[in-house]
Image (cartoon, grey):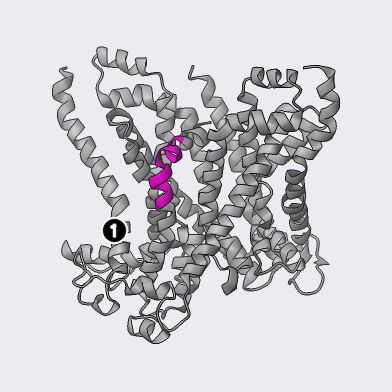
Amino acid sequence: MGQLRQRDDRRVGWLFVAPVLVGFAVFYAYPAARGVWYSLTDYTMLGTPSFVGAGNYTDLLADRQFWSSMLVTAYYVVLNIASQTVLAIVVAGLMHRLTRSVVLRATLLLPWLVPNVTIGLLWMWLLDTNLGFVNHLLHAVGLGTVGFFTDANWAMPAIAGINTWAYTGYTALLLYAGMLQIPQHLYESAAIDGAGELRIFARITLPLLRPVLALVLVVSLIGSFQIFDTVAVTTKGGPVSATRVIYFFIYQQAFSYFHMGYAAAAAVFLALVLGVFTFAQLRLLRASNSDLA
Amino acid sequence: MNSSQRLRPGRILAWVFLAVFLLVTIFPFYWMIRTAITPAADLYHDSGSLLPDQPTLINFARVLGLTSEAEARAAGGSGAHLDFSRYLLNSVIYCGLIAGVQTLLCSMAGYAFARLRFPGRDLTFTLLVSALMVPPIFTLLPNFILVKELGWINTMAGMVAPTILMTPFAVFFLRQFFLSLPREVEEAAILDGAGPWGLFWRVALPMSRGPLITIGLTTTVWAWKDFLWPLLVGRGEEHRLVTVALGVFLQQSPNTQPDWTGLMAASTLSVLPVLLLLVLLGRRLVQSLSFTGGK
């Protein structure tokens, strides 16, 4: 392709990317810079922000509510990611060895298509203390009633369970897609050698899935940290503060108490934590790649 | 070890596990619909059986705003005004606008980043993609203030503004795809005298139907699920989305005794459009998953 194109592209090129660049500048770059600035100020959305230096950050580090929110979030992430990943690997592994059915896969995808608000409502009803189906079931097998959203010990496991229900199918499909990329002849020769299914899974599927698994883990971990909708619908952070996750903490600081600067500082903190996670996980992914081959 | 003997019980167990998993996936939806067609008054003595004694569509009618207030109240409503036909329409417009415009603009940019040559191209692209690392809540607060300053609260413009022009992921994804397109076709078109615009519009785009549908579908689904941003910016009745309306509905419902039949009817309505999408485009959606996820 000659020099003719090269000369033309200069103008056309910027024209092609102009709308996207405007979107990036106005709704990503500018607010990101503004967010950092707000985090250094006292700002209630009325009047102008007044500079307070690192004040918000020192307050944040001394704020027990903030740390409790981080802890509650970590608890949720562990419950959710552990159950979701294990279940998804099992489901994907079984599907991989049993069926290629598109109908089955589409059905597994259904909860992922549904808004988290709907899912929250639906499970609030299913887990309702008096009339909920799950408590009917518990009664039927002779167990007592559980107030899933009113008991501080149950609220977080209940929410983690709901989201595991909602996202396991989706995660399983991602892992399944990864399994389909594993060369089929490996399975054939394993079968000829008389290897059992569990052995095949442990020696072929799992090791060769590792890069995909790591990627899926990073993505779902980062998503899990940002849980909000389900909490906002079901418990609103309660009982007491048992489910006040970090997103909800930031939301409350900003829109219930109008501590914009303080909320922005918490958001910066969260962005840093997530950044470290992404970085560490990607390093891990690269490291584990080399000893596969 | 005789594999066929060892396999049999294992295989059955595996299928049983999958079947149970499927049942647990589907049952809540069944229960949602079952509750939606139950008369509110029957909920207390008849909440455990698999089908209601007297199925009814009154709950759908009242959340769609098709009944008078007195009728809605008699059927278990709290008396608050509900108009889910409007909220559904708002959500469809919201999703259509975002998915349509964003896909077009991001494919243009993706094409330019992949094929056109201009100074600063790769640096600009790296900058755009670095935004993938920023969690949404970080830009959410300042964006809210910006939209407020623009006077766009409770307008469709304010609701779609942050996502209609671009998402870093869409640009990244489409650039990857255009990089993988064979250059030969484009080179032939260049010999025929096509310029960059013609190349993009008549050669590259028609060859990218798959990825365009993938990114369009994914964007539609995410937009359908959006809650926090439209809650902040579009709470007003006029442009309220289905998700926001569900949240508001729950708040209006008395705490001690939520209007479950109405809430489940409204929930069912929020699922129907995506269910339709799944029935019509299930194969495409399922295939696109391996595309975006597995890379």
Which residue carries the number 1 mark?
B30
Is B282 magenta? The answer is: yes
Three-letter code, disc 1: Tyr
| Residue toward you, A97 or A58 | A97
Image point 40% across, 51% down: which residue?
B276
Q: Main secondary structure of the magenta part?
A: helix
Image point 74% across, 25% down: which residue?
B194
Q: Residue B102, image x and y in percent?
A: 64, 47
Magenta residues, start to end: B276-287
Is A91 magenta? The answer is: no
| Residue toward you, A118 or B83 | B83
Q: In the drawing, does residue A85 fall left or right of residue A287? A: left
| Residue toward you, B289 or B238 | B238
Q: Residues within 10 Å of mark 1 (few under 14, many from 20)?
A: some
Q: In the drawing, does residue B195 fall left or right of residue B94? A: right
Which picture quadrant has residue B202? top right
Q: Residue A42, image x and y in percent?
A: 77, 68
